[in-house]
Image (spheres, helix red, strand yellow):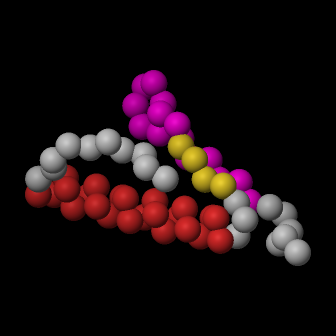
Amino acid sequence: MKLFNGGRLNGKVALRRAQFDIGLSIAHAIVEAHGGRIGAENVPSGGAVFHVSLPLAAPR
């Protein structure tokens, strides 16, 4: 799941982005491991909305 097409970032901004990317990767792996889906969409006023969908019961 690729959310960003970023350019070069320096210093604190690069560190924050790396931490955010790692967090999204972990969330994606956990949700998919439980048979769910995760996605995001941009908000016109700024920011993003994230959607997580998980099944009620484990697949058999």
Q: Who's the residue at 42% across and 46% down the image?
A: 3
Q: Is residue 19 left or right of residue 32?
A: left
Q: How many marks?
A: 0
Residue 46 among those drawn in magenta: yes
User: On the image, which quarter does residue 30 sit in?
Assistant: bottom right
Q: Who's the residue at 55% across and 68% down the image?
A: 29
Position of residue 30 relative to residue 52, above or below, is below
**Percent coordinates x, y for residue 10 in the rendering:** 11, 53
Q: Residue furthest left?
A: 11
Q: Who's the residue at 65% across and 71% down the image?
A: 33
Q: Give the magenta-colored segment's residue range.
A: 41-54
Q: Who's the residue at 48% across and 30% down the image?
A: 43
Position of residue 33 relative to residue 43, above or below, is below
User: On the image, which quarter does residue 54 sit in?
Assistant: bottom right
**Percent coordinates x, y for residue 41 in the rendering:** 52, 37
Q: Residue furthest bottom?
A: 60
User: On the image, which quarter does residue 31 sit in?
Assistant: bottom right
Q: Quadrant of the C terminus?
A: bottom right
The answer to which of 50 and 31 lies nearer the viewer is 31
Residue 21 among those drawn in magenta: no
Q: Is residue 7 left or right of residue 28?
A: left
**Percent coordinates x, y for residue 36 in the rendering:** 70, 60
**Percent coordinates x, y for residue 22 in the rendering:** 38, 65
